[in-house]
Amino acid sequence: MNKKCVLLASCAAALLWASTVIADSVAPGDVMIENLSVAQSLVGQPGDPVEGRKTFANRKLGNCLACHANADLDDQLFHGEVGPSLNGAGSRWTEAQLRAIVVNAKAVFTDLTVMPAFYSLEVGENVREELVGKTILTAQQVEDVVAYLTTLK
Amino acid sequence: MDSTPAPQEQITGEITLDSIMRQSGWSKDRCTSTAWRIPLNRFSMTVVVSALTAAMSAAVVWADPADDTLLIDGELEMVTRTTSVEGHPLPEVISGWHYRSDDTRVLEQDSFDNPGMLGVEEGEEYWNTVEGTMGKSCASCHDDAAESMAGVGATYPKWSETLGKPINVELRINQCRVENMGAEPYPFDKGGQKPLTAYIKHQSLGQPVALDLNEGEMQQWWERGKETYYKRTGQLDLSCASCHEKNNGKYIRADHLSQGNVNGFPTYRLKQSNLVSLHNRFRGCIRDTRAEFPAAFSDELMGLEVYTTWRGTGLSVETPAVRQ
């Protein structure tokens, strides 16, 4: 085997590894919401609450403060009040319930809620072209946010 | 409520340092958790931000529409709250004026302070300007707008037999330009469209919105508009009703959600420092749900104009209203 071959082989191995990592995420259409819960992590391992806090606050990602108050982020101005306060959310809900709510709140609360589904393709009509087939958050970001929410005691 | 506003739009609004200081008697516990309800004026930002720490106790929760009366130039009392027309899902219709801050509401009370009045004055110039192959201005036929256009702003959109659909003021102006002036129609939001529409609607200032749904097929277009109003769009899966019916009166971040009544359009938006047309606002709102948005004056948005105008039945025409 010459050098080129070795290089190609290692590239292929790297690609294979990468695709395995992606394949480990549950696809949006395959997430099972049962008993108002999603029991298993979408990425096969616990999320990172520190990253989740950032995703929660980021206006381009979770943008959760648009609708929810959260005393843990009191350094940020203007917490919304369309949804309930999330103070103590980690005590009121189990991790599996929080995961279901973030994935697709309408599957938990019915159409009575206006909360967007952060990991579902069952969304509104006429989705902006470049967003068709995409979820608001990635599976990893959902897990990070869920991990963060469980810390809100 | 797009999650990706331009930086200057993230914190905009209308409260100045003055009003923060006026509010500073509020108890400290009102600001400890959720509640920074003070939208900041862009140009007073620097001052205000440095004052924020000192004014921690100034945060105010404005959960309810402001209890106030809109009196223009101290003489014209406007109907800004009234019992809803039959079939309306809400018991009372409330003008967006009540949802804005003290400083913004004051701007609309005085014709000299209302920045939208510059647009109205510009519209008057268009009214009197001769254009097109027939050598006519609006005034050539319609003379004094105060008389000839009185009531127009309160009763449009109307049924148009010629078009076989509803026609609004913007399209009526274009029709007149083409047929009676030999002039080019204004492209959406271009040329004199916004100022002239504002000028014409302003002639009905104070008159109650009253559509005639019995004309032609207006009722079918009302139905069509209602469907659009409740249709959830985009990745964020929101309809007009999600914010303006279910959640009016609540804050979405720094924004106090109104009922979305359209009785003040074209409206002067401080955020954009400009008159904003109704169809521009429709499109912006739909875009913010992360959806593709319909063309201005498309059938979908004409239906929505009929329906949303009807929802504000009984409110005074406020054109040009002042909003954040």
Image: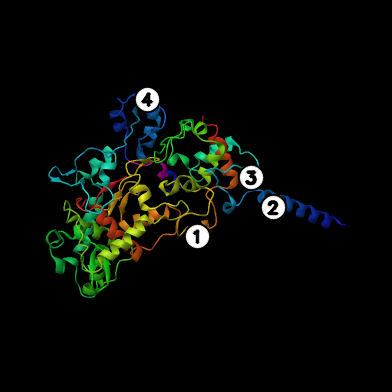
* Label 1 vs 2, first from the N-terminus: 2
Q: Mark 4 falls on what kind of element?
A: helix
Q: Which numbered mark, 1 or 2, is in the foreground of this view?
A: 2
Q: Is residue B204 visible?
A: yes
Residue furthest out toward the right: A1
Name the residue nearer the viewer: B112 or A92.
A92
List x then y, in percent, for residue B78: 17, 47
Q: Which residue corresponds to mark 3?
A: A43
Please give the chain letter of the residue carrying mark 4. B
Q: Which residues are magenta?
A: B8-13
Magenta region includes residue B233: no
Q: Quadrant of the N terminus of chain A?
A: bottom right
Q: Which mark is residue A19?
A: 2
Q: Which residue is mark 1?
A: A129
Amino acid type, residue under disc 3 in the picture:
Val
Q: Earlier in the sequence, mark 3 or mark 1?
A: 3
Q: Determine which of the numbered discs, if any, sits on residue B29 in the image.
A: 4
The chain carrying label 2 is A
